[in-house]
Amino acid sequence: MTATSIFYRACAEQSRRHAKDSQLANVRERHLSSAAAWEAIADRTEKTEASRLARQPVTTEPPAAD
């Protein structure tokens, strides 16, 4: 999990807290929608990171010193 995806998940949690504290239904729905969007962004970020790591070549030797 990258720092970016951790941030996105924190934003989602904050949106859920705001939704819980909201008295108006439309505001609650807006916060819940925002939380879902943040979670989707975090999921995509993690998937992209995993894909990027999988594509990197595996090296067994340390880089050559110049």
Image (cartoon, rainbow, N blue to C red):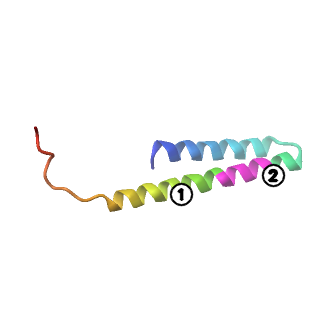
| SS under mark 1 | helix
Residue at left 52%, top 47%? 5
Residue 44 tag number: 1
Residue at left 63%, top 42%? 11
Residue 15, image quadrant:
top right
Specify start and end residues of the magenta stretch as a single range.
Answer: 30-37
Residue located beneath label 2 in the image: 29
Q: Which mark is first along the chain, 1 or 2?
A: 2
Residue 36, image quadrant:
bottom right
- In the image, is 6 to the left or to the right of 49? right
Residue at left 48%, top 55%? 46
User: Which kind of residue does numbered mark 2 sit on?
Assistant: Glu
User: Which kind of residue does numbered mark 1 sit on?
Assistant: Arg
| Front-lying residue, 38 or 23 | 38
The x and y percentages for residue 47 are 48, 59
10 falls in the magenta region: no
The x and y percentages for residue 34 are 71, 49
Tell me the crowding category of disc 2: few under 14, some 14 to 19, or many 20 or more residues within 10 angstroms, Cα based: some
34 falls in the magenta region: yes
